[in-house]
Amino acid sequence: MWNKHQVVEHIIGKQREQAKAKGKAFAPSNIALCKYWGKRDAELNLPVTSSLSVSLHHLGTVTEIMRATEKDHIVLNGIELDEHEPFAKRLITFLDLYRPHPEFKFKVNTSNNIPTAAGLASSASGFAAMVLALDDFFAWNLSLQDLSILARMGSGSAARSLMNGFVLWQAGSRSDGMDSFAKSLDIEWPEFRIGVLTLSDLEKSKSSRQAMTETINTSILYKSWPAQVSRDLDRLLTAIQNKDIQLCGETAEQNALSMHATMIASWPPTLYWLAETVSTLNRVWEMRKQGIPVYITMDAGPNVKLIFEKNISTKIQNVFKCEIIAPFASFSNLNFHKRER
Ligand code: DP6
């Protein structure tokens, strides 16, 4: 079993000379259609199962990294954080893995255009952008596979936030995690849409990390989760290949609700849903009864994402106040898509 330092040593070796005055990168947020829920190794964030996501195009995180003197500075959305705040502590611990020497301090300037910690996977884009910015700063020129492994050690779902479009994170089986990284599916579905509804942007009461640990330790329902994932991944791969929105939407919705069922059945129980979450679910189910093919997915938070195709965008906008993302639209000037190789 390796620790994080050994993995970093293996991937970047001695390449720790500052190469530039500043490293900068963007990474998109992602929403899983088949969720990552449960770890086989908490040190390296190695998952119990594989997972599949779609990246949210321009919604994500931009991070700049510079050298600082005396102490680390973490600036989130323009505000400098106290180094004892949980978010700053988590980033500083992650940066410890990459310092050329202990006195080397960083200034990190990170901005999200999605609500932080409201279940919109900002830790995913946050750690992915951080790893890409470090790659730029130190001129490592790592492969996406290695960057995915490094991002995973910050937050599991960050392994999937380095690529655009549909992304599959293979769980892998090695204890050093060198076979646990994400890859683009390389399938375009131009009509595919995600509707992002922000029902609450309050910090969630329990981290997904804690809820995940409690679920795996106490929820008897969790025993069926690997079987659920295996069935759902097969179905989703078929659905994406055939651009079958019904199979894709139904599978993603059942997968998300099954994940929430495992955590509701854990002890202490975790229920991220608000009254607005439930009323949104009811409204979506009502629309489906009327023949409108719209489906939901949700991460560890109260917010709901809608899954549908372009042809019903107007109907969606008439009912929901949501931002509609076209995951396969072309990019104008975001640096990250140029990295796809
Ligand atoms: C519900 O990636 O935040 O969003 O690895 O502990 O940092 P850690 O967990 P995190 O968990 C995300 C869980 C999820 C599902 C998913 O994105 O697949």
Image: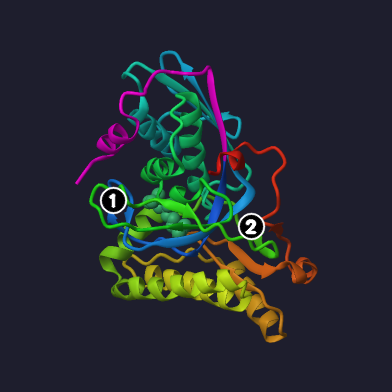
Per the image, label 2 sits on a secondary structure element best described as loop
Q: Quadrant of residue 291?
A: bottom right
Q: Position of residue 222 (x, y in %)?
A: 32, 71
Q: Can I make out residue 55 in this image?
A: yes
* Extreme residue in the left direction: 1
Q: Quadrant of ligand 1?
A: bottom left
**At 42% from the left edge and 73% from the top edge, which residue is drawn?**
261
Q: Residue at x 59, y 48 (%)?
A: 115
**Image spot of residue 309 (x, y percent):** 70, 69
Tag 2 residue: 198
Q: Is mark 1 within 8 Å of ligand 1?
A: yes
Is 320 or 248 nearer to us in this picture?
Answer: 248
**As displayed, is residue 138 above or below residue 51?**
above
**Numbered tag placed on residue 42 in the rendering:** 1
Q: Name the mark nearer the viewer: 1 or 2.
A: 1
Q: What is the C-alpha distance between the residues marked 1 and 2?
A: 30 Å
Q: Is residue 50 above or below residue 89?
A: below
What residue occupies the far front of the structure in this picture?
A: 341
Could you tell me which residue is drawn at 37 percent across and 22 percent down?
Answer: 16
Residue 206 can be seen in this image: no
